[in-house]
Amino acid sequence: MALIVQKYGGTSVGSVERIEAVAAKVKGWRDQGHDVIVVVSAMSGETNRLVELARQIQDRPVPRELDVLLSTGEQVTIALLSMALNKLGCAARSYTGHQVHIRTDSTHNKARILDIDDKRIRHDLDQGRIVVVAGFQGMDEEGNITTLGRGGSDTSAVALAAALKADECQIYTDVDGVYTTDPRVVPEARRLERITFEEMLEMASLGSKVLQIRSVEFAGKYNVPLRVLSSFEEGEGTLITYEEEEMEEALISGIAFNRDEAKLTIVGVPDQPGVASKILSPIGKSNIEVDMIIQNVGADGTTDFTFTVHRNDYGKALAVLEQTKQELGAREVSGDNKIVKISLVGVGMRSHAGIAGTMFEALANEGINIRMISTSEIKISVVVDEKYLELGVRALHSAFGLDDKQK
Ligand code: ADP
Ligand code: ASP
Ligand code: MG
């Protein structure tokens, strides 16, 4: 008998019929004698609907109130799923985040889980009940409702699995595992049987939304066995694991991409000490996160400086940079919010040379101009024009032999 934490995403609980199908699946695990904790998301589209309702009142609603609103989506699902389980003769109890003491910091809309008190859940499990917990939410020190950022139910599930030392954390979603790239963009993408925590972390932080980044961080840190599976069909899914000797040494494990990018350039800034900080400090002070940074080699005592930000911050960053231009006596500020980032990820990169060359050649063969490049130990990212996203990802997927030949 094992303790299993299962998480069902929005599409998996998208209708009453789907919720009843999830209940039957959960019952199957219970009938095999396992203890089951189920974490659920809001029904598909619900969180977006709530965000939109708030926007109709205020462009930037008070984060605390937004959390009170957003957390309601998951509360609907826990109740309906518990009812469906009860109908099948399974004793079940639903809980919101604060009822089971999922304690977070106070960063509304993007809170971090600090700890979970497992007493109440343990008690229910000991009584033979299935415990159904609302994902994506918690409570801060003062008792305010918090949410964990989009996709946060993944993190709720992993955190519960870590707190209760579960034998496995299963993330049920609308694909049957982690693929070499988003199967919606590349139909030839292949399901991976295993992927390392390190690679999954890179994939998630570079834009693959199949798992929230923090859930992978958490699972790696607390050694939670994590599996991504389909809630619609049977299968082994993908196991996220530590690197093992016998793991097949794929050169590239996957390709991630991010559409939420924008880049800004300040031209003709004085090429002297402190200039990078003079450009980026005001950006940081405005709470804008900077991703890639490039500074050109100086000429005539001046240089150009380019960086990328989240597309939502583009307007704000442009305004801040205009101000910096005045202060530094720079020549010009320009920007582009129709760019995307495509990244190759793989631990195999550590021991193989020439990957960047193959990548750039594959893009060149399609006439795709690379605007920025950045590398680290197990990834290479390029920024290209938005219109080349699909073409670029497909070209790289086939250049690195990732295509499923059977499709
Ligand atoms: P859920 O609502 O279950 O949390 P998400 O929409 O958050 O589901 O995540 C699943 C989606 O992630 C898939 O439908 C797929 O389009 C997308 N995705 C992006 N990259 C990948 C990848 N490498 N492997 C599998 N799915 C991916
Ligand atoms: N309902 C939340 C969202 O849509 C959390 C989640 O589904 O993981 O982002
Ligand atoms: Mg998700």
Image: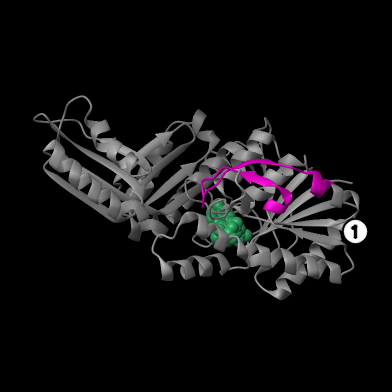
The part of the chain drawn in magenta is 98-122
Residue at 15% x, 38% y is: 327
Does the magenta-highlighted stretch encompass residue 318? no
Quadrant containing the C terminus is bottom right
SS label for mark 1? helix
Residue 252 place in picture, x, y as percent: 52, 41
Position above or below: 332 against 86: above
Residue 256 place in picture, x, y as percent: 48, 49
Residue at 50% x, 41% y is: 345
Q: What is the quadrant of residue 104 in the picture? A: top right
Residue 288 place in picture, x, y as percent: 36, 45
Query: Is residue 182 visible to us here?
Result: no
Does the magenta-highlighted stretch encompass residue 107? yes
Position above or below: 173 against 252: below
Colour mapping = one colour
Image quadrant, ligand 2: bottom right
Q: How many marks?
A: 1
Give the side of residue 353 with respect to residue 33, left or right: left
Say few, some or many: other residues with alpha carbon within 10 Å of mark 1 (under 14 / 14 to 19 / 20 or more): few
Residue at 44% x, 33% y is: 376
Of residues 275 and 271, the one nearer the viewer is 275
* Mark 1 vs ligand 1: CB below 8 Å: no
Give the side of residue 138 with respect to residue 252, left or right: right
Q: Amino acid at mark 1?
A: Asp
Residue at the extreme top of the image, as rendered:
273
Give the side of residue 255 with respect to residue 277, left or right: right
Give the side of residue 161 with respect to residue 128, left or right: left
Tell me the residue that label 1 is attached to.
31
Q: What is the quadrant of residue 247 in the picture? A: top right
Position above or below: 137 against 25: above
